[in-house]
Image (cartoon, rainbow, N blue to C red):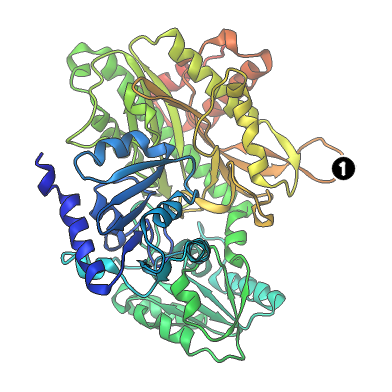
Amino acid sequence: MDTRTSPARLNIERIRAVLQAEGCAASLIPSSDPHLSEYLPERWQGRQWASGFTGSVATLTITLDKAALFVDSRYWVQAERELAGSGIELVKTPSPVASYHIEWLCRQVAPGATVAVDGDVLGLGAARQLESELERCGVKLRTDLDVLAGAWPERPATPAAAVYEHSAPEAPESRAERLRRVRAAMREAGATHHFVSTVDDLAWILNLRGADVSFNPVFLAHLLITRDSATLFIAPAKVDARLAATLAADGVRLAPYEQAGAALAALPESATLLLDPKRVTLGTRERTRARVVEAINPSTLAKSRKSDAEAAHVRRAMAEDGAAMCEFYAWFEAALADPSTRASLTELTIDEKLTAARARRPGYVGPSFATIAAFNANGAMPHYRATPESHASLASDGLLLIDSGAQYRGGTTDITRMWPVGSLSAAQRRDVTLVLRGTIALSRARFPRGTLSPMLDSIARVPLWEHGLDYGHGTGHGVGYFLNVHEGPQSFSRVIPDATMAMQPGMITSVEPGLYRPGQWGVRVENLVLSVPAAGLSAEFGEFLEFETLTLCPIDARCLEPSLLRADEIAWLNVYHVTVRERLAPLVSGDALAWLTLRTAPLA
């Protein structure tokens, strides 16, 4: 490739031309949109457009003569490959929340010069940190300039997919009741108004779903709630007349998407506006003259705690998902065993066949994220994705990691399993076993209700720490109910916790420790778990919680070294496999049932 004409080099030069015209010395381009979404509509994928890096999380900084991309350990290998020839410096950071990009700007930008960032896509908390640290360096911050607007002439339009109702029985609570609950929290906070931009929050509040963001059934909109009414700011064509009438009957009026900012600006100074500082942008905060109360969105806490009715639907969705995987893995193992078909199997085949199996199950809507089918060295990249241009064949022996999930009208799934392709080495079986021990350890944990979720992270790491091993990502994330596969506020991770991250009954969280050996293989074993009251304990020291494992799929014992498992860990695995077999057997037949029976046989 001629690096002088690489797309990234040309796009960065376009951005530099805008910076020069505006009198700015540098720009910061986050991986963000006006809703602070994890998965971005194409219009706001400016960091990817400018750098060529396709990972979901990174920060790009550009000066008039340098550029740098800041990524955490999940993406180091991928970024090295994708940045080749771009002229962009790769800066490896220990975590996604590190502020190395600000330190870099302070070194590169002279005191008195200006750094530009689009305040409409910069989170309020991030903006405050950026402004404070740049001020310490004597650097000015400009937040009213979107450099992409002038540099990206072919920039995509906003998505236009229709919005639809998430209705009963899968939506067991009415829209009116959810609005009532949010207003009760508003009153408790002393707020007259509440503004919501995070798309999963407003989808939950209004029992609506859409298709504006890849893999997550959400739509682009803002919501302004008062004590007796609500306004949904959304592109008019996205809501048909029948749905508009239904919303109106619940006191929700519609207004054009672009009018949200003006509505905030029009609030009187006597109003008290509830804003979540972690879930609104700087641009949103700066538009209002009203008194602001900063607190977590009431809906964020509410939707993290699934009701008993929702949990029942999730269990059914997990069973359908497990049945789909039985069908897929039965086919997959037969294809591996046949020399005439094995030669044609690739990572792409897995994505295609597994998605097709899920699509045949009742209630299926679509994948919950891009399937990760990663063979041998590709597994060492936690967010690897096979493409037609770059993927591995399964013709040789090795370790296969499959991380996949689906959206059902009654729940969201996310599962990672390890599979042997041919024979495995002793080192590979050792790594899988140690990671599984971490999964088991956290899955069996009991803890006081209200324990801050990051405190539980280390439980899954201890079996690896005993051998001097570790992994660079969090151990688990919250999971939505037919919503985002990643949601808060809880997470098992090495972050500084706050009170909103307390574990409560009804929370669904992933348990996914891992181990990655660059250039060799990667391991991750993931289940989703539901927080429930711990059985058989007295209340002498308060209420305790434990986890119910929701995910239903065998863990392949051929990847394990049984001698590394304690008797109680083997017992846990055997009991889990009994549950998997009993729950899935009525949903499958033929080869899939035979495979299920084989792979859930007890481990001696």
Q: The N terminus lies in which quarter of the figure?
A: top left
The foreground one among 22 and 70 is 22
Up-down relation of residue 258 to residue 519 (above or below): below
Residue 416 at least partly seen = yes
Q: The C terminus lies in which quarter of the figure?
A: top right
Q: Is residue 463 left or right of residue 210?
A: right
Q: Amino acid at mark 1?
A: Phe
Write down the quadrant of residue 592 in the picture. Answer: top left
Neighbourhood count class around disc 1 (C-alpha, 10 Å): few under 14, some 14–19, many 20 upward: few
The foreground one among 542 and 181 is 542
Write down the quadrant of residue 268 in the picture. Answer: bottom right
Residue 106, position as x, y percentages in the image: 43, 57
Q: Name the residue located 42 percent from the left edge and 81 percent from the top edge.
A: 261
Write down the quadrant of residue 81 in the picture. Answer: top left
Up-down relation of residue 359 to residue 325 (above or below): below
Q: Name the residue located 20 percent from the left edge and 18 percent from the top edge.
A: 341
Residue 55, position as x, y percentages in the image: 33, 45
The foreground one among 481 and 359 is 481
Q: Name the residue located 51 percent from the left edge and 64 percent from the top edge.
A: 201
Residue 549, position as x, y percentages in the image: 59, 35
- The residue tagged 1 is 541
Name, please, the residue furthest toward the right: 540
Residue 269, position as x, y percentages in the image: 58, 90
Numbered disc 1: secondary structure: loop
